[in-house]
Amino acid sequence: MVRARIESLLAELSLEEKAALCAGSGMWTTTAVERLGIPRLKLSDGPIGVRGGHLGSGTTAACFPNASALGATWNSELLQEIGVALGQEAHSKDVHVVLGPTVNLHRSPLGGRYFECYSEDPLLSARLCVAFVQGLQSQGVGACVKHFVCNDSEFERHRISSQVDERALRELYLRPFEAAVREADPWMVMAAYNRINGTWACEHRELLVGLLKGEWGFEGVVVSDWFAVHDTLGAARGGLDLEMPGPPRFFGPALAQAVKDGRVPQSELDDKVRRVLRLVLRSGARSSEDAPERAVDRPEHRHLARRAAREAAVLLRNQGDLLPLEREALRCLAVIGPNAWATAIQGGGSARVQPHYALPVLGAIRSACEGRVEVLYEPGCASHKTLPVLDTSRIRAADGGGAGLTLEYFAGLEPGGEPLLRRTAHSAEYTWLGRFDAAVDPAHFSARLSGRFAPEEGGRHHFGLCSAGKARLFVDGRLVVDNWSTQERGDSWFGTGSTERRAEVELRAGIPVELVLEYSREGAVAMGGVRLGHLPPVAEDAMERAEAAARRADVAVVVVGLWQTSRPRATTRATWSCPQARTSWWSACWRRTPTPWWW
């Protein structure tokens, strides 16, 4: 019946409509053909949560441990459960296909996206991938296995050619993809940015047509990574089915013209359309109207995320049988390290979500010890590259609401007049890519974030701004950080944003000050974005204070990681020792490395 419906629709579609179905209509949506009742589909990142139709500034979502942590569990049943949970999350975001899992292999310590990938081992990656896809698609939501193939380096990621021989290709890099296709029937596979032996992944007919669709029998859609297509004829003849995002550059009208000119056979276009139509019918989509995205914080998802994080923790050594700690035997516990306070719970780019909630290591330990064990905290040092994102729990919205910042959007490139939209923001970091609200033109707007900040500590506080676009920060009406009149290009927002500009402000403990951050989309290239960083005073004798806390305590838990990016986030595996203090070997974490350029 499905096949008959596909052939019936195919017969009624015009050439232009067929070519349109092979390209996106927006950043996260495919193209609808209203005349025939063919709805558009909504795609969304990513492997650890379902973000929805935005890039970090929309509704909150469940946030599961990163893939490298899940790889450390060696538990395919757990991965299937997480897939089921993400299918449920997808329904709450009106999402039809989740852009994950990522099954590229860990091949170099310099790989910037390995927190998104399960393992360096192709067999382990294959077993976890199959389980994840089966769980996700059991909920009527498609999986998109990515990035096909050999997308294992971030260096020159849009230009690099991965040189690999046939045996290594099949035994290592292709193995997780083959297992997924043969055993789990994913609805979609994403072609990568890179070349393989000199040929672009999106144009690689030998791999996409000969191997994936031919030898393996893949019946789903081959979609491009975002902006990865280089040529109409090469991609069309190479086996790509869907160019993303829209509006199209190389498919759509250009593809229709190529068919008219005889450069692309009609039969190959029809094969692409059949695959897209099969995906639409599989999804059960009925309408192209945008359904509201909902933030559904399910208790069972919280429990599953905690269980996954527990299984992912790797105990490197248990010297002297110190672990597990006996809470009843402790009088005082020292927590050391800036990452205990600014804990990284996820990486960035396409794998990022805005979590329903997040608890730093320090907060979790204090909660577990409350009323029973004295907890001392000392950062010992500062370990950030950019200042940690401002903790909005210490902010009161300017409109008199609860915790958070008042966020206002304006129609022009200079904030002023009546706002188009007003809401409470619980983050001081935003990325705007594509349309994020019907009331706001995503290419021509400004915004204002404001609230009253009462610092816990007195002294010289550090504030920092970086942006894709223009930004400036006022404290009690005084301009303190100017990233508006001049900027220096940096590596923020995949290389399209500025470096961080900082200032020090003397504040008194408990005395509120008015923070106003103004942003303009003017000058932003591919996307808009702003991040307000904040670092409380760091004592000159911070290390001495940390050592003193460790000496005083029965046990010292030291959290060590890469630079603090925001609060809260994840830590890396760590150990630390101090004379006269019993030291816990504490491993909480999953890998976090910076992601250059796009994502």
Image (cartoon, helix red, strand yellow):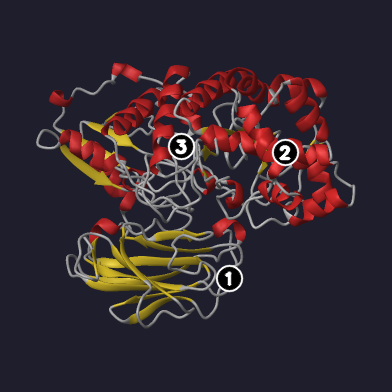
Q: Height in image: 331 above or below 258?
A: above
Residue 524 horizontal/vertical position (percent): 57, 69
- Mark 2 → mark 1, Cα distance in angstroms: 44 Å
| Helix, strand or loop for disc 3 | loop
N-terminal label among 2 and 1: 2
Give coordinates of residue 302: x percent, y percent.
30, 33
Residue 166 marker: none
Q: Distance between the residues labelled 2 and 3?
A: 29 Å
Q: Which is closer to the viewer, label 2 or label 1? A: 2
- Residue matched to label 3: 48
* Side of 340 where 180 appears, left or right: right
**Mark 2: few, some, or many residues within 10 Å (few <14, many ≥20)?**
many
What's the amino acid at mark 3?
A: Ile
Q: Earlier in the sequence, mark 2 or mark 3?
A: 3
Q: How many marks?
A: 3
> Which type of secondary structure does the marked residue at label 2 adopt?
helix
Q: Do the residues labelled 2 and 1 touch (CB within 8 Å)?
A: no
Residue at which label 2 appears: 272
CA gap, disc 3 to disc 1?
Answer: 33 Å
Q: Residues within 10 Å of mark 1 (few under 14, many from 20)?
A: few
Q: What residue type is labelled 2?
A: Lys
Residue of label 1 = 488
Camera sees residue 104: no
Residue 494 % position (x, y): 59, 56
Judged left or right of residue 584, residue 266 is right
> Is the C-beta separation of discs 2 and 3 under 8 Å?
no
| Residue at the image position 74 percent from the left and 27 percent from the top | 213
Q: For the residue labelled by badge 1, is the local secondary structure a helix, a strand or a loop?
A: loop
